[in-house]
Each structure stands twice: as structure tokens, then as C-alpha cells.
Image: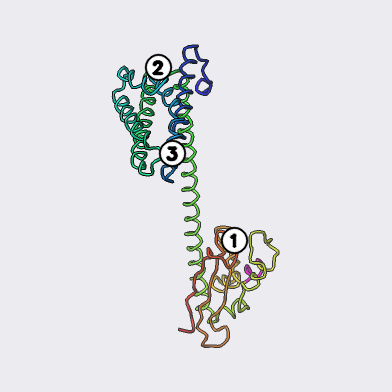
């Protein structure tokens, strides 16, 4: 791993190649920036200003060509036109010739408003030439001017990409695991609610009394509304004691007075199951169903993740 991250010491020849690449990158940025300025000026019908910017770009364009192809820099466009036959890339030579012709056509029309079409044609020719030079540089960098630094950067990119992939993979696995755990806990809580709801119905059926009469409360869970955040409540809290007492009386009614197991008193997240006694609460024909409530993963009463189970009516159909 040390070898991968250790930057190589370049030989003198590699240093020169790196300087050449840095020069090409800088020249491409300058040419691109000025080419964009030419385009914007043409779009705003400032053709004379656009031509002035284009002419200021010419020295850098000629220098870019000479550095990419490692040839002597032509001092003028005319000299470049004479020597371009010796350039190794015929496509670039052809595009450069096309650009020179468009530029020469534009020159005499610099102050004429109708020069817009010629200016636009010249700008497009420049764009094609710059794209071809960028491609030529990429090919050159790939095949002829590679250094140890290129191999180092390639290895570094591979290691970084691998590490990012592994981090994302680990994050995905962790998220999937947490999601599955959450689903499992919700299923467990729903199953426990169903079991307790069945016990509550059997308690009513066995005793012939409503839950209001069995627990001695018309709303055991109402006391918890005063402090709906159940995350930090102690066993001595009024909400917890009331919930446990109501559950215990319900359980004892169907299990002949036996004490309710501790594991049945709380849901999958450690909060007490809550009872809302409704059947026959206000009158004998009050058919609202009793409810069992789990405050869910956030352990706060009254939020959207609360789970409920309706207890079947035993007296009012």
C-alpha cells in the first residue's frame, strides 16, 4: 500500500514530458476561454470585438500546435499554413486550413454588420480545431508521452475508486441490515399486539365484563399523553405504572390471577404497551372498539409510526 501512495521520483526526461503536458493543458484552457469569449461576442453581435479576441488567441493556438506535435512554432498563420503539411495529423491539418480560410474571409468584413454569418462560421471552425487538438493531446498522452506519474495517478484513481465502492457497499449492506431489523421489529410488535388483543377479548368473554370494568380505567393510556416521549421514562413513572397495571389486570383476568410476564409488557423497542378502553365506556351500547397501542420505533406517542390493534367487541356488536 505504501508503494501505491508513494509519489514516484521522475527522471529528467520524465520531468520534461510532464512540463510539456502542463504547458499543453494551460494553453488548451487559455484557447478555450478565449474561444468562448469569441462565441459570446458574436452572439451579442459584437463581431469586431470578437475578431480582436480571436486574433489575440492566435499566438497561443500556434504555440499549442507546436507543443502537441513537438514541431517548431510557426511565427505567423501564413508560416503555419506552409508547414502544416508536415504535421503528423492530417485531420488537424485539414481543420486548421478550414479555420484559416474562414478567418481570412472574416477579416475584410470586420466592421460590417453582415459579417455575422462569416464570424459564426469561423467560430465553429475554431471549435472543431480545438476539439481535434484536445483529442490529439489525449492520444499523445496515452501512447507517446506517458511517465511514471501517469501510472501512479492511474493506480491512485483505481485505489480511490475501489475504496469509494467498498464504502458505498458497506453503507448499502448496513442500511439493508438496519432496514431488515426495523421490519423484523415491526413484525414482532404487530404479532405481540395481536396476541394481547386476543387475550383482552378472552378476558372480556371469560369474565363477562368490559375492559373498562376489568382495568378500572376508561383510558389507561391517557395519562401518557402528558409525557408522550417514552424514551426516558423510568419504571416508577406514572405512565409506565398505569400501563403495566392495566395490562396486568387484563392478563390476570384470563389467566386466573397469574402475574403477567415482563416480556409481554413492553414492545420490541422497550416501551410499555398501552390500553385505550372504549367498549361500553359511556353507555351499554357504546360499540367503540378497545385498542392496544405500541408507540413504535421512535418511542413517542401520537406519531405516524405508532402501531395499533383493535380488540374485538365482546358485548356490543
Sequence order check: which comes first, mark 1 or mark 3?
3
Quarter holding residue 210: bottom right
In the displayed structure image, the side of residue 93 where residue 31 appears, left or right: right
Dominant secondary structure (helix, strand or loop) of the stretch shown in magenta: helix
Quarter holding residue 28: top left
- Please name the colour scheme applied to the rendered image: rainbow
For label 3, the residue is 48
Instruction: Name the foreground residue: 131 vs 206.
Output: 131
Q: Which region is colored magenta? A: 240-245
Instruction: Name the foreground residue: 139 vs 279.
Output: 139
* Residue 220 percent coordinates (x, y): 62, 74
3D distance between C-alphas at marks 1 and 2? 72 Å
* Residue 52 percent coordinates (x, y): 45, 34
User: Where residue 70 is drawn, which disc sits there?
Assistant: 2
In the displayed structure image, the side of residue 248 where residue 238 appears, left or right: right
* Front tag of 2 and 3: 3
For label 1, the residue is 299
Sequence order check: which comes first, mark 2 or mark 3?
3
* Residue 181 percent coordinates (x, y): 49, 52
* Front tag of 1 and 2: 2
Q: Secondary structure at mark 1?
A: loop
Amino acid at each position: 500500500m505504501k508503494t501505491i501512495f508513494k509519489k514516484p521520483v521522475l527522471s529528467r526526461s520524465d520531468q520534461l514530458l510532464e512540463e510539456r503536458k502542463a504547458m499543453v493543458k494551460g494553453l488548451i484552457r487559455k484557447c478555450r476561454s478565449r474561444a468562448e469569449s469569441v462565441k459570446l461576442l458574436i452572439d451579442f453581435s459584437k463581431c469586431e470585438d470578437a475578431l480582436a479576441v480571436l486574433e489575440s488567441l492566435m499566438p497561443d493556438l500556434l504555440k499549442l500546435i507546436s507543443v502537441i506535435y513537438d514541431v517548431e512554432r510557426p511565427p505567423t498563420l501564413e508560416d503555419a499554413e506552409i508547414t502544416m503539411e508536415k504535421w503528423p495529423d492530417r485531420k488537424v491539418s485539414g481543420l486548421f486550413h478550414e479555420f484559416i480560410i474562414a478567418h481570412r474571409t472574416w477579416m475584410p468584413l470586420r466592421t460590417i454588420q453582415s459579417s455575422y454569418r462569416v464570424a459564426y462560421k469561423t467560430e465553429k471552425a475554431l471549435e472543431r480545431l480545438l476539439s481535434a487538438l484536445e483529442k490529439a493531446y489525449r492520444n499523445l498522452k496515452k501512447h507517446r508521452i506517458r511517465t511514471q506519474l501517469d501510472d501512479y495517478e492511474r493506480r491512485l484513481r483505481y485505489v480511490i475508486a475501489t475504496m469509494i465502492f467498498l464504502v458505498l457497499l458497506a453503507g448499502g449492506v448496513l442500511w439493508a441490515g438496519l432496514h431488515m431489523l426495523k421490519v423484523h421489529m415491526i413484525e414482532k410488535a404487530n404479532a405481540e399486539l395481536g396476541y394481547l388483543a386476543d387475550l383482552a377479548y378472552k378476558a372480556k368473554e371469560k369474565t363477562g365484563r368490559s375492559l373498562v370494568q376489568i382495568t378500572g380505567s376508561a383510558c389507561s393510556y391517557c395519562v401518557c399523553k402528558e409525557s408522550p416521549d417514552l424514551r426516558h421514562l423510568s419504571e416508577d413513572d406514572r405512565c409506565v405504572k398505569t400501563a403495566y397495571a392495566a395490562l396486568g389486570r387484563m392478563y390476570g383476568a384470563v389467566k386466573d390471577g397469574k402475574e403477567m410476564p415482563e416480556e409481554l409488557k413492553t414492545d420490541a423497542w422497550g416501551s410499555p404497551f398501552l390500553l385505550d378502553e372504549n367498549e361500553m365506556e359511556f353507555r351499554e351500547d357504546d360499540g367503540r372498539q378497545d385498542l392496544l397501542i405500541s408507540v413504535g420505533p421512535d418511542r413517542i406517542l401520537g406519531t405516524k409510526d405508532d402501531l395499533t390493534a383493535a380488540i374485538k367487541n365482546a358485548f356490543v356488536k
